[in-house]
Image: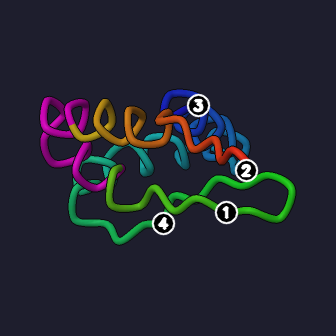
Amino acid sequence: MFVYQYGKILVAAHRLGPGSLQRFLNEFKNFKKWDFDVKVGRKGRTLDLSKLAKVYALDQQAGLKFLDRYVEILSMSTDIKSG
């Protein structure tokens, strides 16, 4: 997901004109200091992944561990049986 979005940003920066991509790459060195929101949604439901993305930006290993736990929690069965 991150790689796809990053690729889209690179293409957009490239299309802005000469030197834009290079300026973006130079500014990207300060990425960890940026304030950004990461949200995904489908059918009117939105999932905010901003904290996960910020943890990953600061420490990739901690971010992956956090993501694994997050997926585990979301994958737990929540079936409710009617009695």
Compared to residue 82, the image places residue 62 above or below, namely: above
Compute the Cα span from label 1 to label 2.
31 Å
The amino acid type, in three-letter code, at marker 1 is: Thr
Of discs 3 and 2, which sits in the foreground?
Answer: 2
Image coordinates of residue 16 in percent, x first then y, are 70, 51
Q: Of the numbered discs in the image, which one, if any, rests on residue 46?
A: 1
The amino acid type, in three-letter code, at marker 4 is: Asp
N-terminal of the two: label 3 or label 2?
3
For label 3, the residue is 7
Compute the Cα span from label 3 to label 2.
50 Å
Question: What is the magenta range?
Answer: 53-65
For label 4, the residue is 37
Compared to residue 62, the image places residue 27 above or below, namely: below
N-terminal of the two: label 2 or label 4?
4
Compared to residue 22, the image places residue 44 above or below, namely: below
Q: Nearer the viewer, residue 27 or 68?
A: 68
Q: What residue lies at 31% left-to-right and 66% top-to-bottom?
A: 34
How many other residues sit within 10 Å of disc 2, few (<14), some (14-19) or many (≥20)? few
